[in-house]
Image (cartoon, rainbow, N blue to C red):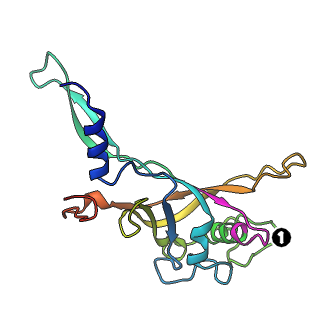
Amino acid sequence: MAFNINDFKATMDRFGGPARLSMFEVEIAATSLDGTEIAPGIITTRDLRFFCQSVSVPGVNLETTTYRPSGIGFPESIPTSSTPEALNCVFILDNEHRILTFFHRWMNTVMNVGSARGNTDSGLPIHQIEYKNSYAASSLIVRHYSSTNVFNSYEFEYLSVYPTQVGNIDLGWGSKDTIATITVNFSYSKMAYEGFRNRNITNPTFIQ
């Protein structure tokens, strides 16, 4: 069957057209697993989502091993486990340094990486690690929105989340018109994607 551009366009239109990478938001829970507020008084969860410039949504991977059913011949692969990929976000920095303060303070509640002068605001002795329930956010949700229907979104949810790295900032006199950003890498214990849920995708705006 020959390719028909009209059939292609009609099919794309029927499903709302191509998805746009720029239609998203990232929402980090304001409290940890035990209910402790994360970096209180710095920035609200609602405001924080406007500063996330980009996010690398982890893929879904299966580790496999090969075997030969009859001991010889063509090998087959079988799944053995699932390996999570990294969850990385890039945040725009503000002139009041609230974004930077938020993530540096959050990191320091995981492990006191501050100066050797003694305790910091986290209350931890130098290089001591806190219990996970007190520093891991209950969830981080990425919502990818439709560009034609704001009520339609696909959710990627990550549970028991905490930052493992707050990236470096390259300052320079030649970067006058460059917006400052930081990359934050997160660890998570579980993920729940919209497609994992056993329910029909219904959207009367797109699907007839």
Which residue is at the far left?
70
Q: Residue 80 is drawn in which quadrant?
A: top left
Q: Let me know if residue 129 appears in the view.
A: no
Q: Residue 121 is drawn in which quadrant?
A: bottom right
- Identify which amino acid the numbered label 1 is placed on: Arg
Q: Of helix, strand and loop, which one carries label 1?
A: loop
Q: In this rendering, is residue 23 above or below 138? A: above
Q: In this rendering, is residue 35 above or below 197? A: below
* Lateral position of residue 127 relative to residue 135, left or right: right
Q: Position of residue 73 (x, y in %)?
A: 14, 15
Q: Let me know if residue 152 appears in the view.
A: yes
Query: How many numbered badges does the structure rendering display?
Result: 1
Q: In this rendering, is residue 122 above or below 167? A: below
Which residue is at the far right?
173
- Please tell me which residue is depicted at 70% across the width and 73% down the height of the picture: 125
Q: Is residue 53 magenta?
A: no
* Lateral position of residue 120 relative to residue 117, left or right: left
- Rendered-image quadrant of the N terminus: top left
- Please tell me which residue is depicted at 40% across the width and 50% down the height of the picture: 84
Of 147 and 200, the residue lying toward us: 147
Of 72 and 60, the residue lying toward us: 60
How many residues crowd mark 1 within 10 Å: few (<14), some (14–19), many (20+)?
Answer: few
Q: Position of residue 31 (x, y in %)?
A: 52, 80
Which residue is tagged 1?
117
- Please tell me which residue is depicted at 82% across the width and 52% down the height of the picture: 177
Which residue is at the far top?
73
- Rendered-image quadrant of the C terminus: bottom left
Q: Which residues are magenta?
A: 89-100
Q: Position of residue 98 (x, y in %)?
A: 72, 72
* Lateral position of residue 29 relative to residue 6, left or right: right
